[in-house]
Image (tube, rainbow, N blue to C red):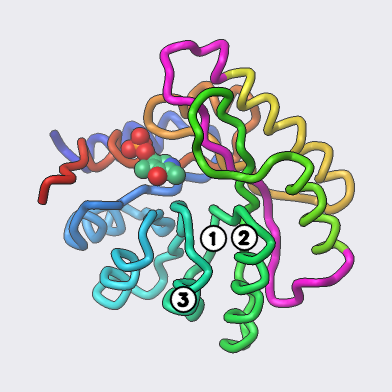
Amino acid sequence: MSIQKNYEEIIQSLPANVKLVAVSKTHPAEAIQEVYNLGQRVFGENKVQEMVAKQPVLPNDIQWHLIGHLQSNKVKYVAEFVDTIESVDSEKLLEEINKQAAKHNRKIKVLLQVKIAEEDSKTGMEVSETKELFLKYLQGHFENIEITGLMGIGTFTDDTEQTKREFLFLKRLFDQLSVQKKLETLSMGMSGDYQLAIECGSTSVRIGSSIFGARDYSI
Ligand SMILES: *Cc1c(COP(=O)(O)O)cnc(C)c1O
């Protein structure tokens, strides 16, 4: 397995309007540096502790995306440097991000995570809650936050019709909300389903194992 070969294949397969978030969770800083040296700047981690450990030892023009469930009391550890929090799944969390961003006198970009999986109980908000939160944002409640789009995780299944339904469901909501404020990021698609996600309108794919190889959680 060659990280360089994997990365180049992925990059070549992505349409020009689709951004890549290289998901580096469980992989060491050296592997991230290798992909950085190939030109990648956006990296995704799902745990605060891991992101906080890696960030200081890697180049500071990396755009860090938090993609995993985030507890409100941990926002403070990433507020100074995180580029985008993709996994906003409650108003409480959004309020805390806003507060911590204000402390650092900056704006943090966020995506609202919507529950799209029909079967898996993956985290994310229901559509009604997502719309309410977006409306509050439009009314000016969260000054130190910019909602740049939506994120969703499809069901882990071989049934591509089901995954397609889930992606199109999120795309429809994205288009609806975009009428009120132009949104730029529709984050959906991982190693196993990113091509389908792109067909369904994804503008940002989160790819880990197809770049870095399989993850080893035993170490
Ligand atoms: C781990 C993870 C990914 C990447 O998964 P791969 O299948 O390795 O590409 C994408 N999104 C989220 C939210 C993840 O936690």
Image quadrant for the N terminus? top left
What residue sits right under mark 2 in the picture? 110
Pick the residue in front: 86 or 183.
86
The residue that appears at 60% across and 40% down in the rendered structure is 203
Pick the residue in front: 27 or 76.
76
Q: Are marks 3 and 2 in contact (CB under 8 Å)?
A: no
- The span shown in magenta is 139-163
Image coords of residue 105 (percent x, y): 62, 87
Pick the residue in front: 143 or 61.
143
Q: Which class describes the residues within 10 Å of circle 1: few (<14), some (14-19), or many (20+)?
A: many
Q: Secondary structure at mark 3?
A: loop
Cα distance between the residues tagged 2 and 1: 5 Å
Q: Are marks 2 and 1 in contact (CB under 8 Å)?
A: yes
Q: Which mark is residue 85?
A: 1
Q: Secondary structure at mark 1?
A: strand
Q: Taking 137 as reference, is 105 above or below it?
A: below
Image coords of residue 81 (percent x, y): 46, 76
Q: In this rendering, would 216 be left or right of 201? A: left
What residue sits right under mark 3 in the picture? 81
Amino acid type at mark 2: Val
Q: Taking 166 as reference, is 4 above or below it?
A: below
Q: Quadrant of residue 60?
A: bottom left
Q: Taking 202 as reference, is 134 above or below it?
A: below
Nearest to N terminus: mark 2 or mark 1: 1
Amino acid type at mark 1: Ile
Q: Secondary structure at mark 2?
A: strand
Amino acid type at mark 3: Phe
Nearest to N terminus: mark 3 or mark 2: 3
Cα distance between the residues tagged 3 and 2: 13 Å
